[in-house]
Image (cartoon, rainbow, N blue to C red):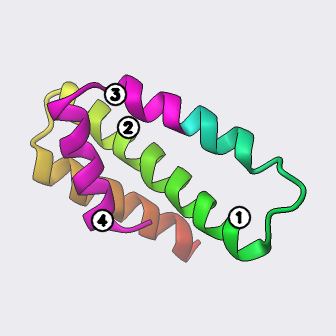
Amino acid sequence: MKLPVIKHLTQFIEDNDQDYIVETLEVLEAMVEIPSLKDEELDVIGELISNMYGALEVNKMIKDGIDKKEALNSFMMRVLGAIDK
């Protein structure tokens, strides 16, 4: 996951609607089932999916009243904490 990408997607959700991200996730998740995709392509799609889910989570925290910067930092700390375990 990359914080600049999640931040950009979070701004996109604020400017537009999270439905665009949700629908894009559905398409990407369907695409990973294409048998001819190479590992590198699957890695890129997986990275896109994880960043989009991250942006949705950050957006949820913002809707719950957490400051945008704090929500982004909190989310990344959770991610890094999960990786360290």
Q: Say what amino acid the circle numbered 3 marks.
A: Gln
SS of the residue under disc 3: helix
Residue that label 4 marks: 3
Query: Is 15 positioned to the left or the right of 7 in the image?
Result: left
65 lies above or below 12:
above
Res. 42 mark:
1
Mark 3 to mark 2: distance in Å?
7 Å
Residue that label 2 marks: 56
Answer whether residue 3 is magenta in the image. yes
- The x and y percentages for residue 55 are 35, 45
On the rendered image, what quadrant is the N terminus found in?
bottom left
SS of the residue under disc 1: helix
- The x and y percentages for residue 57 are 38, 39
Res. 18 mark:
3
- Camera-near label (4 vs 1) is 1
Residue displayed at 21% across by 28% down: 16
Question: Do the residues bearing badges 3 and 2 touch, measured as CB atoms within 8 Å?
Answer: yes
Q: Farthest residue toward the right?
A: 35
Mark 4 to mark 3: distance in Å?
18 Å
Q: Earlier in the sequence, mark 2 or mark 4?
A: 4
Which is nearer the eye, 37 or 42? 37
Q: Which residues are magenta?
A: 1-24
